[in-house]
Image (cartoon, grey):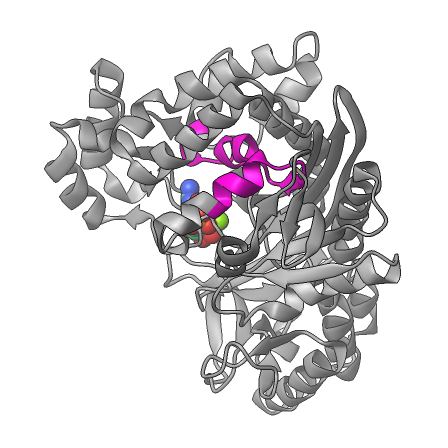
């Protein structure tokens, strides 16, 4: 059976030191880049995006299973986004107590009331998984908004291939998989742009204030320019100041007609710094531009929806007559539990308080660092268990993968071996026009690895680093 990187390499201190230098240069050569923390809005000084020295072993069966289920997940997200009754019911308790979700929901309702202007839908999502002790694939969450690292992960395979060759591990080097989510994601954006049907219209990346991770997005922009599609990068601020709709609801920003709005910002409450920012979101939602994602697809990606999907019989409603699709999706679900008021929610509270280490408590937030673990679960639940405030959370089984050794390379970080956990992401892209799915694809993968000391946090949060799977 195929193996991971042997200890004779992993534990050879002199070799590891040499390889780390080689690896950093290879990452810079390949363009696995980030701006430095001190100057996130200038490319004068850049560094390599943090990554592992070696690829991490991933069981082949679980990897293929994750790829195979992706188009079903795309379909599921899309169907949820079109089912306003389902969204209303699923989120009813959450929006009573979670202001941010409530605000998004109000935009959703307003759009429904006014009638959706655009029937072209572009979905770029990433379904994330961990493997439990039995190597069984368990979904952590699906990201329907600003799923990142499709760009940089298109460049990391060559870095690990090179490192392994220098280490004398040609066989392992050959086993590093090709990966090009940037091309696949851009392909779907290009399709949506084409269906919008105006040569002069642009793709607008709605970007963050802090643009440290700009290169990840530049890969997708570059793929679009290759196809002679113009892209612009704008912040909420620019949309507030210069955004408008014409009488046909075509969106104009800074003088450009916008065919596609690709949101890379707007998923956190902090992104909405003023009422004008919310107005700008509403303006874009109302417009004829294709939104990636639109407001209903944004809501379909909430953790509450994920929990409701795990209830008996719910998936079946979305896939009538398709028991295989239901089975494939459900096989990836971890235990998910409601904290709504009532006996079922009471049971969840009791279960979590009795063994907090078995669970993760999740609010409706994205971007890493928001979940609650261990003793803190008890603190929070003791406080909210008697009130409706608890409905802002869901409870989830904690996936506990077997830790593996690796070296995490980050700017100015020490070179030391760590116990690591990996999270596999799979990119999905789809385009729908009216009732026709014109594209539905799995377009690549992402492996992120972090030290097992950290329960939470992604690459952008400074916890996880980029990696590649070495199938075993
Ligand atoms: P976010 O939207 O903030 O990315 P996630 O649900 O993806 O929220 O959780 C963030 C991180 O927390 C994940 O990347 C993972 O490392 C960890 N995590 C989340 N859920 C679980 C779980 N059920 N078991 C183990 N770790 C988890
Ligand atoms: Mg996540």
* 64 magenta-colored: no
Seen at 67% across and 32% down, the residue is: 74
Q: Quadrant of residue 127?
A: top right
| Res. 96 visible in picture | yes
Nearest the camera: 391 or 15?
391
Report the side of 301 relative to 434 (left or right): left
Res 341 quadrant in image: top left
Q: Main secondary structure of the magenta part?
A: helix
At a point 82% along the width and 37% down the height, the residue shown is 195
Residue at the far top: name it: 321
Count of all numbered marks drawn on residues in the image: 0
| Residue 133 visible in the picture | no
In the rendered view, does 133 fall on the left or right side of 351? right
Kindly indicate the quadrant of the structure image that contains residue 466: bottom right
86 vs 327, left or right, is left
Residue 237 as seen in the image, left or right of residue 51: left
Q: Position of residue 465 (x, y in %)?
A: 54, 67
Magenta extent: 280-305
Residue visible at 47% across and 21% down in the picture: 87
- Closer to the camera, 249 or 327? 249
Residue 295: in magenta span: yes
Q: Residue furthest right?
A: 227
Q: Give coordinates of residue 238: x percent, y percent.
A: 53, 60
In x, y percent, where is residue 374?
25, 48
């Amino acid at each position: 059976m195929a193996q991971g990187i042997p200890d004779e390499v992993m534990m050879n201190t002199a070799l590891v030191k040499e390889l780390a230098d080689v690896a950093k240069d290879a990452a810079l050569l390949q363009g696995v880049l980030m701006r430095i923390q001190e100057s996130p809005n200038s490319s004068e000084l850049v560094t390599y995006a943090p990554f592992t020295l070696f690829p991490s072993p991933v069981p082949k069966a679980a990897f293929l299973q994750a790829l195979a289920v992706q188009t079903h997940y795309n379909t599921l997200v899309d169907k949820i986004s079109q089912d306003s009754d389902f969204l209303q019911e699923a989120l009813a308790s959450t929006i009573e107590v979670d202001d941010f979700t409530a605000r998004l929901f109000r935009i959703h309702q307003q759009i429904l009331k006014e009638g959706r202007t655009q029937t072209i839908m572009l979905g770029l999502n990433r379904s994330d998984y961990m493997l439990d002790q039995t190597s069984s694939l368990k979904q952590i969450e699906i990201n329907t908004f600003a799923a990142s690292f499709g760009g940089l992960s298109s460049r990391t395979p060559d870095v690990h291939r090179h490192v392994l060759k220098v280490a004398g591990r040609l066989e392992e080097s050959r086993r590093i998989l090709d990966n090009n989510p940037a091309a696949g994601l851009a392909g779907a954006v290009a399709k949506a742009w084409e269906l919008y049907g105006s040569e002069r219209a642009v793709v607008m990346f709605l970007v963050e204030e802090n643009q440290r991770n700009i290169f990840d997005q530049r890969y997708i922009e570059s793929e679009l320019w290759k196809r002679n599609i113009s892209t612009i990068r704008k912040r909420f601020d620019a949309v507030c100041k210069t955004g408008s709709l014409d009488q046909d609801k075509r969106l104009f920003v800074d003088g450009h007609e916008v065919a596609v709005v690709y949101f890379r910002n707007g998923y956190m409450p902090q992104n909405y710094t003023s009422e004008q920012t919310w107005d700008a979101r509403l303006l874009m939602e109302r417009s004829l531009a294709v939104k990636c994602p639109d407001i209903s697809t944004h809501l379909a990606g909430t953790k509450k929806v994920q929990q409701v999907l795990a209830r008996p019989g719910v998936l079946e409603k979305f896939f009538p007559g398709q028991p295989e699709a239901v089975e494939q999706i459900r096989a990836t679900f971890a235990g998910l539990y409601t904290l709504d008021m009532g006996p079922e929610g009471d049971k969840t509270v009791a279960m979590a308080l009795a063994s907090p280490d078995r669970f993760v408590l999740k609010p409706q937030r994205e971007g890493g660092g928001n979940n609650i673990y261990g003793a803190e679960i008890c603190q929070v639940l003791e406080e909210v268990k008697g009130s409706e405030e608890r409905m802002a959370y869901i409870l989830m089984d904690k996936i506990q993968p077997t830790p593996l050794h690796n070296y995490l390379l980050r700017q100015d970080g020490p070179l030391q071996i760590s116990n690591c956990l990996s999270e596999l992401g799979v990119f999905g892209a789809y385009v729908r026009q009216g009732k026709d799915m014109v594209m539905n694809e799995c377009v690549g993968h992402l492996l992120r690895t972090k030290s097992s000391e950290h329960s939470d946090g992604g690459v952008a949060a400074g916890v996880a680093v980029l990696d590649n799977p070495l199938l075993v």
